[in-house]
Structures are given as C-alpha cells and as structure tokens.
Amino acid sequence: QIDTTEPRDGSSSMACYDNGFGQNGTEKATLVMLVRNSELREALGSIRMVEDRFNRRFHYPWTFLNDKPFTDDFIKYTSGLASGPAEYAVVPNDNWSIPDHVNKTIMRAEMSRLASAEVIYGGSLSYRHMCRFNSGFFYNQEVMMKYDWYWRVEPGIELYCDINYDPFTFMRENKKVYGFVISMYEFKDTITTLWDRTRQFHLGNGDYNLCHFWSNFEIASLKFYRSEAYSRYFEFLDRTGGFFYERWGDAPVHSIGVGLFAPKNSIHHFADFGYSHAPCSRCPQDDESHTSGRCLCNRNKHFDSESYSCLPRWWKVAGMNKGTKRILFFL
Ligand code: GDP
Ligand code: MN
C-alpha cells in the first residue's frame, strides 16, 4: 500500500505513485533530457515546469543522458523534482566521438572557417557531437529501449499551459509519428550539402526551403527512428562526415527524415502548447486557453506569426490536404 500523503523526497526513485491528482500515464513513454552537469539549475527549472504543467498528473519516468557521469548533486536534485522514476545514463563513447572515416585536418579547417564566419556554434566540437547524437543515437540508448515514445525536454525551457491530457496517448491513438511546437528556417551555412546528400540517398526533386521543426521540443515515436528507413538515412549521412565538416543540426535531419519517411498526416503541431526556448516563444491564440486559466502567456509574443516562422507554410500544406503523402511538400 502506498501512502499518498507522504511528501515527495529524493529517495523516491520508486515506481509511479498516485498523488491524488489523477492516474499514472499508461504509455511506454519517457521525458528525456540530454544535459550537462553545469546546466543543473536550468534543468531543474525545466523539470519543475513540466511537472507542474503536466507530469504531476501522469508521473512518467524521466531519462537523463550525458556524455559524462552525472554528479551526485545533479542526481539528488533532479530526482527530487521528478514525480516519476528518474534514470541516469552515460552515452557510450562511440556515440560521442569523431568516427575514423572523418578527416580531422579537414574538419578542423572547416570548423575554423565556420567560426570566423560567425556561424552559430560553428567552431564547437561538442555541439557537433550533440547534434550527431540527437540525430542518430539517442533512440538506441540502452535506457531508451523499453520506450516507444519520448518527449524531449531541454534545460531552460518554459511551458505556459497546463497539459491536461496525455500527449503520448494522443500520438498513439491518432497514429502520429512526430509532434512539434515551433518551426523555422535553418541557417544555410550549417547544412551546405545536407540536401544534396539527402538527394543522393533518396531521389527527390526541388530545393530545400530550410524549414524544419525546432527539435528542442519533440514528442515523437522512437519506433520511427529505429525503423530501417530512418536508420539507414542516418548511417548514410554519418558516412559523409557532414556532422563534423559542416555543422548539421539534429533538427533539419529529423525534419527531413520525417518528411521522407512519415506520412504527412502523422505529423502533429501541438497548437495547444505554450512554449519557450530562448530566443523564441509561442502562445496559444484562442480565447478559451486564456479565459479558462489553462495558459499564462503573452499572445502577442508569438513566434508562429513572425516572418522567420515556417508555420504559415505548414498550415498551407498540412491544412489543405490531409493525405498520407510524404511531406517533402513542406520542406
Ligand atoms: P541550442 O538549444 O541549440 O542552443 O543548444 P543547447 O546548448 O541547448 O544544446 C542542446 C541540448 O543538448 C541541451 O539539452 C543541452 O543540455 C545538451 N547538450 C549540448 N551540448 C552538450 C554536451 O556537451 N554534453 C551534454 N551532456 N549535453 C549537451
Ligand atoms: Mn537549447
């Protein structure tokens, strides 16, 4: 018998318990955060907010991933906030290192070129490891294998609205593969050859308009990434060395992968989520979200209606024809 009057404490990496707000989530799903020990404060802010807005009613497990061992403090404070179990794992070295086929001399030259061109994170090797990891490895980590769904949470994000339903169940029941909140244009200089490489892998036509789903928030299917189609796409991209010679982000890689291999109507825009990850935020525009007290955010501070957003393009194609066509339509 579990005593629900007991306060939460750091020792409760026990199974889900019912705190009286509702029942536990029932999907094979996890809240996943790749994070550095130095980001503890920002991580706690994100966990607090995801718990308050959503997970205190569902108690989904948290999974924390890191290229270095987590410190005792990191584990102590984050598990203290988690209302479900919390699991911590170190990424295997070959998921976070330069593969042998990458020519390091060329890589270094290209990195300094991008750095002096002031391309964002252009000179950062750790950022490249992170993007490659999020493109091709996170979904096959041992601690992830028991799950079918994930919600990616980054340190320092904000959620502005209560999520009173289970988005994982929503995804499953509606046969969704990929859910996003913000979509925007990628910096061309970070992915100079990504589209050409993609076309070598998978015949396609036209140019890439640089639209992608912002991957710091994702609610998506792990089975999708584990599929033969996506895995082979990632392996092909990885062989080209582009994650290191250029600075391919996991966001355009996920987006193009989803565009190539998932039906258009399996992609979902979570328009009911209020979300912020610096420097962008979005806020539900309908009245009810605000009169009901569900959301607290400034409706005028809304990235979806700014010129750098790809949402207008998305609405055009996704709204017009809810077919099962693949969405290179949108990209
Ligand atoms: P940005 O959102 O593109 O500005 O990049 P972030 O710095 O937020 O990195 C994206 C995600 O990867 C965040 O969850 C970071 O905590 C995580 N991350 C980035 N670099 C590293 C790293 O070197 N080690 C670890 N463990 N996590 C990292
Ligand atoms: Mn971030």
Image (spheres, rainbow, N blue to C red):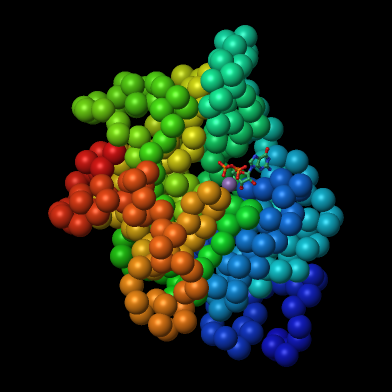
Front-lying residue, 131 or 185: 185
Residue 267 place in picture, x, y as percent: 32, 54
> What's the residue at 36%, 79% (across, down)?
288
Does the rendering let one see residue 6? yes
Quarter of the image for residue 123 reads top right
* Residue 42 picture location, percent across and down: 69, 55
Quadrant in which the N terminus appears: bottom right
Q: Quadrant of ligand 1?
A: top right
Residue drawn at (55%, 50%), measured in percent from left and top?
Answer: 278
Q: Is residue 269 left or right of residue 242?
A: left
From this view, report whether residue 180 is shown above or below residue 195: below
- Residue drawn at (73%, 65%), measured in percent from left and top? 79
Residue 236 in view (yes/no):
no
Q: Position of residue 274 (x, y in %)?
A: 46, 65
Q: Nearer the viewer, residue 279 or 104?
A: 279
Q: How many marks?
A: 0
Eyeballing the image, is 284 above or below 40? below
Which residue ends up furthest to the right in the rendered image?
72
Q: In terms of image quadrants, where is residue 157? A: bottom right
Viewer-nearest residue: 102 or 273: 273
Place of residue 54 in the rendered image (x, y in percent of width and height, measured from the top left): 54, 72
- Is 74 displayed left or right of 148 in the figure? right
| Farthest front residue in view | 300
Q: The C terminus is located in which quarter?
A: top left
- Left or right side of 36 for 182: left
User: Residue visible at 31% across and 60% down?
Assistant: 175
